[in-house]
């Protein structure tokens, strides 16, 4: 007898919770979501003095969908379209002390999908389209005369994002993503004193697919990503009076696909096309510091495909055109120890790998074309310290495919 779990629909969230074992007929879901109006989420924290922590989480998303089964098969058809502009904005003002730890998360997105299967088979088609003008995530800390123990911030803007999980199962999945919205992640922070680690990151992507498989799973995935936006940009600026270990990072990608499986097979067909101007900029300074770094990474199309334990089959096509790729990193240190400015810009990049001790095999067809300028600029300035390092790396197309032993 077929046993079906309830389908829960709450706003834009749909989930499947099976109540029985898998049968010959799968749990089925048809999801259609259209968002036409603008979406915005904003918050401000004004802090005088706290002892423990300061935390803020700001999220704005056009459409959100989630589906999962435990011990059953899953058949999904999902269509998401987001047309309204999206803004997530976080501001924190600190007079004296924001506590032992300060955590800020700011996320703006057009479409978000999440699908997972455990002990079953997933058959799915996901269509995501973002036609908005802008998707913006903004975050800022203003604390020039204040202190904290540690500070961690994440500021992210994504046009389309699809997450996939397969555990002790199998999946045959197709993901189609089309983004036309300019995506901006804009992060900033000023602190008088950070006694521990300060990690502030801004990330922007037109389209993103993340797949994770384990428990001997087999996965077949087809991904088509097209980013036709004018701009995909990530920027983060930080300044400290004194910081023990400060790292400021900006990551921008027109299209990104990351698929890693621990099982019998990962068969991935990827087609990525980027037309946006992609810019990543990280700027940081400190009057006194232990270690400090500004890291900027910009890429038009990025694909990572690996299987630890089985066979990897890759058919990868990447085409980057439009406005070009630029990465800018600058670090300025007064008195301290080790400073770093690192900038990396790439038109197209692909990585595929398998495991030799697991009798793994790698089969690859790779086709990459870049038609635009790619530039990386790194600037490091140090008044007094132990070391200053700079890395500037610009590449039109890069592909790395290898078979290695576990742990290497």
Image (cartoon, grey):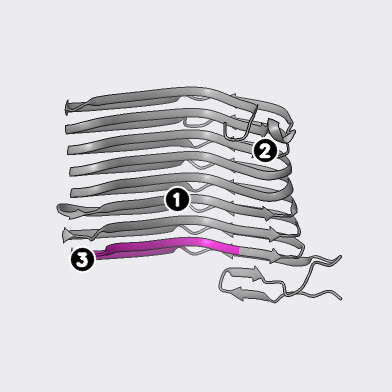
Q: Where is residue 52 in the image (x, y as percent from the top left)?
A: 26, 64
Kindly state the secondary structure of the residue where label 3 is placed.
loop
Instruction: From the image, tell me which residue sits under label 2.
Output: 270
Residue 217 location in percent, x, y? Answer: 73, 49
Cβ–Cβ under 8 Å for marks 3 and 1: no
Residue under label 3, please give it: 50
According to the image, label 1 marks what residue? 157
In terms of image quadrants, where is residue 270? top right
Which secondary structure dominates the residues rendered in magenta? Answer: strand
Q: Is residue 143 above or below residue 17?
A: above
Whether residue 274 can be seen here: no
The boundaries of the magenta stretch are: 38-65
Is the residue marked by circle 1 packed among few (<14), some (14-19), or many (20+) residues within 10 Å? many
Across and down, in percent, residue 275 comes to: 54, 35
Of pointers 1 and 2, the one earlier in the residue sequence: 1
Q: In which quarter of the image is the C terminus?
A: top right
> Callout 1: helix, strand or loop?
strand
Q: In this view, does 56 lie to the left or right of 35?
A: left
* Mark drawn on residue 208: none
Please rate how many residues cluster around mark 3, counting C-alpha atoms within 10 Å: few if below 14, some from 14 to 19, many from 20. Answer: some
């Amino acid at each position: 007898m077929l046993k079906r779990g309830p389908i829960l629909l709450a706003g834009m969230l749909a989930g499947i919770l099976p109540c029985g074992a898998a049968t010959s007929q799968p749990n089925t879901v048809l999801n259609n979501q259209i968002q036409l109006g603008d979406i915005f989420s904003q918050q401000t924290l004004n802090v005088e003095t706290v002892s423990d922590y300061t935390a803020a989480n700001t999220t704005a998303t056009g459409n959100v969908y989630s589906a999962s089964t435990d011990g059953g098969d899953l058949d999904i058809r999902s269509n998401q379209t987001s047309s309204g502009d999206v803004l997530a904005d976080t501001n924190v003002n600190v007079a004296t002390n924001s506590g032992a730890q300060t955590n800020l998360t700011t996320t703006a997105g057009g479409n978000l999908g999440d699908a997972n299967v455990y002990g079953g088979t997933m058959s799915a088609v996901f269509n995501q389209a973002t036609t908005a003008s802008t998707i913006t995530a903004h975050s800022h800390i203003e604390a020039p005369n204040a202190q904290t123990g540690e500070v961690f911030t994440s500021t992210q803007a994504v046009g389309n994002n699809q997450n996939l999980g397969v555990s002790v199962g199998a999946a045959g999945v197709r993901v189609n993503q089309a983004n036309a919205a300019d995506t901006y992640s804009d992060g900033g922070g000023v602190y008088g004193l950070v006694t521990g680690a300060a990690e502030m990151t801004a990330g922007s992507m037109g389209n993103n697919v993340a797949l994770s498989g384990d428990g001997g799973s087999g996965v077949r995935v087809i991904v088509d990503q097209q980013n036709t936006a004018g701009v995909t940009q990530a920027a983060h600026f930080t300044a400290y009076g004194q910081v023990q270990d400060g790292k400021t990072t900006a990551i921008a990608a027109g299209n990104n696909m990351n698929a890693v499986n621990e099982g019998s097979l990962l068969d991935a067909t990827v087609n990525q096309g980027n037309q946006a101007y992609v810019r990543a900029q990280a700027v940081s300074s400190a009057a006194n510091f232990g270690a400090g770094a500004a890291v900027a990474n910009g890429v038009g199309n990025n694909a990572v495909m690996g299987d630890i334990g089985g066979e990897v089959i890759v058919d990868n096509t990447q085409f980057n055109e439009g406005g070009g790729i630029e990465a800018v990193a600058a670090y300025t240190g007064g008195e301290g120890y080790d400073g770093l400015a690192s900038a990396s810009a790439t038109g197209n990049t692909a990585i595929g790998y398998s495991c030799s001790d697991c009798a793994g095999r790698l089969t690859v067809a790779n086709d990459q074309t870049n038609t635009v300028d790619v530039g990386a600029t790194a600037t490091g300035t140090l008044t007094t310290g132990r070391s200053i390092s700079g890395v500037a790396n610009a590449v039109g197309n890069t592909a790395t495919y290898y078979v290695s032993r576990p742990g290497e």
